[in-house]
Image (cartoon, helix red, strand yellow):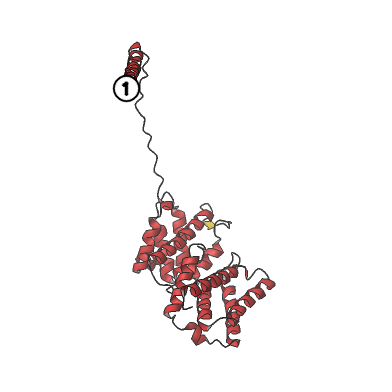
Amino acid sequence: MDTRKKRSLLVEKLSRLHSSMASFNKSDESYDQSLKRLTVFAENSDVESVKVLYRILYALPNIGKDTKRETYFLFLENFNSELGELGFSNDELEEDLTPNEQVVADLFFSENIGKNLRLVEYLNSAFFTESQKTSLGKSRIVIDLIKRCKTSYDPDTDKLNEDDFGISHEEFEDALKSLEESKRILIYRAARGIDEEYMNRGLLLFIRSCIVNTQIDDSEVDSKVMSDEEKVIEKLVIGDKLFQPTQSQQTFTRPSRSVETSFEGIFWAFALLAFAVIIMFLINNTK
């Protein structure tokens, strides 16, 4: 982990392991294979590498559409037990990252966040070094969540209907529960600032109601002071081109040019042609 090449190779391994977690709960066989895959990595890696993997798995649950987060964290508890049997202590796994470990974590972010916008827990994370890039990544996650809500929202029933490109009511509730209070409020504030031509007011009230139902004080939703990073994310979401109203295209009519069909136009055409012939004749004779 002490050289650029070693860190890059480690990030590749971590990315594959993290990506494979999306299917851990498809069957008993998938569950066992996922646990074995993580355990084999731990058996053949140093403490620093296992620590970064462990922290990433907890910070960014990569779960399939039909998997509850509760099930995912129960799986990680089983992995934690396996790590204990291999001699890794919780104190080692949960202590602050060293500079080298932080570099690996940030490289993992660069390689993976943006490819999987459904990792809503990334909004919580102070695990990665904060930068303009991380704020942009978080804004994209908020944008994707709002887009999926818009796709699924039925104004007639005031519900989210399950859709392959949208999000079900249960998924949305589960996602909100996984977020810190301030990040739930951030989602509403960002949605509130989106142009009315894109954001249905009924959907906005629906999102607000769902957030209040996560035991957030009603007044806090509108009055809570956000952090500097949250304000940046809010502005990035509101300013995204996707949410800008489609401006009506102005059509410009060119003044129609009258076609010269008169004898005067024909005369000048022949005159210019004759002039060109004379010039060419003179040039050839002077050589």
* Residue 50 locus on image (x, y percent): 53, 80
Amino acid at circle 1: Ile
Q: How many residues crowd mark 1 within 10 Å: few (<14), some (14–19), many (20+)?
A: few
Position of 80 relative to 117 (above/below):
below
Q: Is residue 254 left or right of residue 62?
A: left
- The residue under label 1 is 283
**In the rendering, at what x and y percent does residue 170 appear?**
56, 64
| Percent coordinates x, y for residue 218 in the rendering | 40, 67
Give the mark count: 1
Q: Could one spot residue 182 in this view of the protein?
A: yes
Residue 8 place in picture, x, y as percent: 50, 71
Regarding mark 1 in the picture, which secondary structure is present there?
helix
Residue at the image position 51 percent from the left and 57 percent from the top:
148
Q: Residue furthest top?
A: 263
Is residue 50 shown above or below 115? below
User: In this orientation, which residue lies closer to the viewer: 106 or 1?
Assistant: 1
* Residue plotted at (41% across, 62% down): 136
Can residue 225 be seen by looking at this rendering? no
Viewer-closest of 164 and 96: 96
- Residue shown at 60%/82% (left/top)? 43
**Quadrant holding the C terminus:** top left
Furthest residue toward front: 287
Check the image and report above or below for 62 versus 79: above
Which residue extends farthest right?
29
Q: Quadrant of residue 88?
A: bottom right
